[in-house]
Image (cartoon, rainbow, N blue to C red):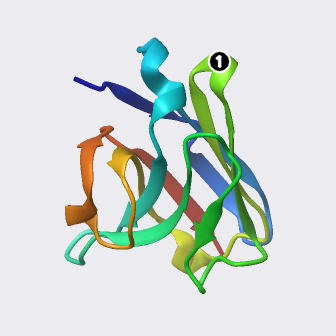
Amino acid sequence: HVQLVESGGGLVQSGGSLRLSCEAAESTFKTYNIGWFRQVPGKEREFVGAINYSGSLTDYADSVKGRFTISRDNGKNTAYLQMNSLKPNDTAIYYCAAWGWGATDDKWNYWGRGTQVTVSS
């Protein structure tokens, strides 16, 4: 069983930056891929990006390419989502996911509870 905890969300002005963290309690963190998704109430969960278990491969949604960067520190059991040049339509609850790969949420097996990101105009 994998437990994930997101942190780092908050309120930021348009054009600003935030870094989200996704921490796992298990030492097996280094063996599985991590994905990031976001969801606005009333809409489906949207793929943001993913990083493979070693950090050697990343994938991003077109909407965030060039603005968001995913990284991980396996020694700290933590993955990161660095978000720059934030826009109001980036406002959402951001979730990290584990044990999967792909741009739809059915491709991932474990989920955190999410952290709210609000971007004001």
Q: Residues within 10 Å of mark 1 (few under 14, many from 20)?
A: few
Across and down, in percent, residue 112 comes to: 33, 38
Q: Nearer the viewer, residue 114 or 24?
A: 24
Across and down, in percent, residue 19 comes to: 69, 45
* Residue appearing at x 46%, y 54% in the figure: 35
* Residue 61 shows in this picture: yes
* Residue appearing at x 41%, y 15% in the figure: 26
Element carrying mark 1? helix
What amino acid type should be assigned to the residue bearing mark 1? Lys
For the N terminus, the image quarter is top left
Q: Nearer the viewer, residue 29 or 40?
A: 29
The residue pinned by badge 1 equals 76
- Residue 45 occupies quadrant: bottom left
Residue 56 in the figure: left or right of residue 38: right
Q: Taking 106 as reference, is 23 above or below it?
A: above
* Residue 23 shows in this picture: no
